[in-house]
Amino acid sequence: MNTRKADVLIIGSGIAGLLAAKLLSVTKNVMLVTKGSLKNSNSILAQGGIAAAMDEHDHWKEHYSDTLTAGNYHNHVETTEILVKNAAKYIQQLIALGVPFDRNSNNELELGREGGHHRNRIVHAGGDATGNRIITQLISHVKKLVTFYENEMTFELLINNRKCVGAITKDSFGNIQFYQAEHIILATGGIGGLYSLSSNDITVTGDGIAMAYRAGASLIDLEFVQFHPTMLISQGKTYGLVSEAVRGEGARLVTNDGAYIMDNIHPLKDLAPRDIVAREIFYSLQNGNQIYLDITMIKDFKKRFPTISDMCEKNGIPIHTGRLPVAPGAHFIMGGIKTTSNGETSIPGLYAIGETAWTGVHGANRLASNSLLEGITFANRVAAHILQQSKQEQPLTVPICMNHKLTLPAKKEIKETMTKHVGIIRDKHGLQTAKKWLEEYLPSYKGNQYLDVSIEDMETVNMLTVGWLITLSALERTESRGGHYRTDYPKPNDEKWMKHYITRRRKWDESNQIKVPSAAIIH
């Protein structure tokens, strides 16, 4: 058996995975494997920046308050405080690593503003190229210190005596590779690929969440999916994200006839939390309007937003008209693999950080520019935790590859089903329709039998699995809160659901085999 051994195996190459690799590589043998290239991630696409209370008139407690408000007070308060309290420190860490954040004429960090923030506190780089600048710098560090393998999709986690001891991957040529490590970190990103319109990288299909579920890890808050209000769209096709920072600079959402759609909807108008803005755009589109971002008030738009400008020019969308056509698209999942504040999952030896993890910091709806901050924060914490652990190597158990014939739908069908029934607007009938359709295809889990299927089919299995789990949780939460909105329960029900979290996991029988398809625990 061809096995690659390391102290730490990291799966994923976004900001969380790369920074954890950099920090751990000082004293650990670290391997990093990623489904695409090192530059395939949501992090590299991030435009807006990183939220941090850096101004002398700002304070982390104000950032904390804005985060809780956006999250509909469903946030885990202890981890949310950790997130915002250390933000300024981690900005300095990135500066020390060479990240060239934008500065004003006084050499002070430029601070932008985005939806849900009551102050300018968004640190950015390259105008709207923040993620690209950070990831490029981290890759330059990691390449010197870490062994990395690109274009390998992780199929399954290896569990021995209920401890995670490794993983199995497959490359585009069909070659199977085994990895063994004391510590396995999932940093695989979110679930945007489950929907027809998405801001996410093409490789993001919920793989980490699906693998963790099959391994028996606890998952939490999967019903909360954030749709970014402003995807650049033309003729039904999306071309990428129009950063919330554009509205932070004064851009307004308007209809064909120039009516402002967010007036009288929320005190912050166009800078209201994302779930509110996305729903209002959705309703306007349903009523036959085309929605635009009016950018006429932004001076030197091309200079301030070069990434968005290039995106428009490459796709034939004129900027000189002062209007960019937009629509909501799947952007971020607030739920994920349940972890401690140190990234530990319910399975010893397995960790999760970044969007694939649930730390509770986002509540029911993530505040703008808290995503990169989350990746940085918990990459630091998981690295510090692992560096304190004593060595306890576990034997690697090799699974028997079982032949398994799968009957699977096209990915497009999954996207259409999720968008129609488990999207921005939900109800019982639609959710039950989606559940029934997904269960027609969802394979039963019998072991590591998927080793003989293609990468394309494995992605489809993961999409079906995560789509089903999101749907089940959305059915159970009989209220509307943040990114979860049901027309049959259009208001929050604080008495029943405030700080009540839906956890999903598989159970184990005495022979150490997973046998129960899904269990919901509400606590």
Image: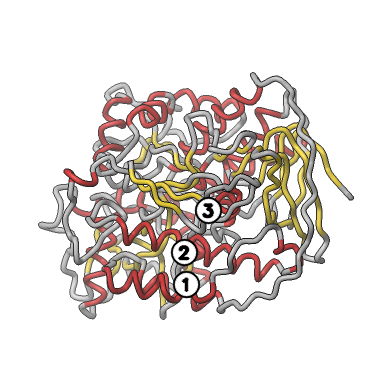
Q: Which is more N-terminal, label 1 or label 3?
A: 3
Point out residue 137 in the picture as x, y percentages from the top left corner.
Answer: 64, 39
Residue under pointer 3: 45
Q: Is residue 432 visible?
A: yes
Give the residue furthest to the right: 1
Q: CB under 8 Å between callouts 2 and 1?
A: yes
Point out residue 439 in the picture as x, y percentages from the top left corner.
Answer: 48, 71
The three-letter amino acid code for the residue at tag 2 is Gly
Q: Which is more N-terminal, label 1 or label 2?
A: 1
Q: Is residue 36 visible?
A: no
The three-letter amino acid code for the residue at tag 3 is Leu
Q: Which mark is residue 438?
A: 1
Judged left or right of residue 476, residue 309 is right
Placement of 62 over or under 150, stated as above or below: above
The three-letter amino acid code for the residue at tag 1 is Leu
Judged left or right of residue 454, residue 86 is left
Point out residue 119 in the picture as x, y percentages from the top left corner.
Answer: 27, 35
Identify the secondary structure beneath mark 2.
Answer: helix
Task: Name the one closer to the observer, 424 or 218.
Answer: 218
Label 3: how many Cα within 10 Å (few below 14, some 14–19, many 20+): many
Placement of 199 over or under 1, stated as above or below: below
Judged left or right of residue 343, residue 160 is right
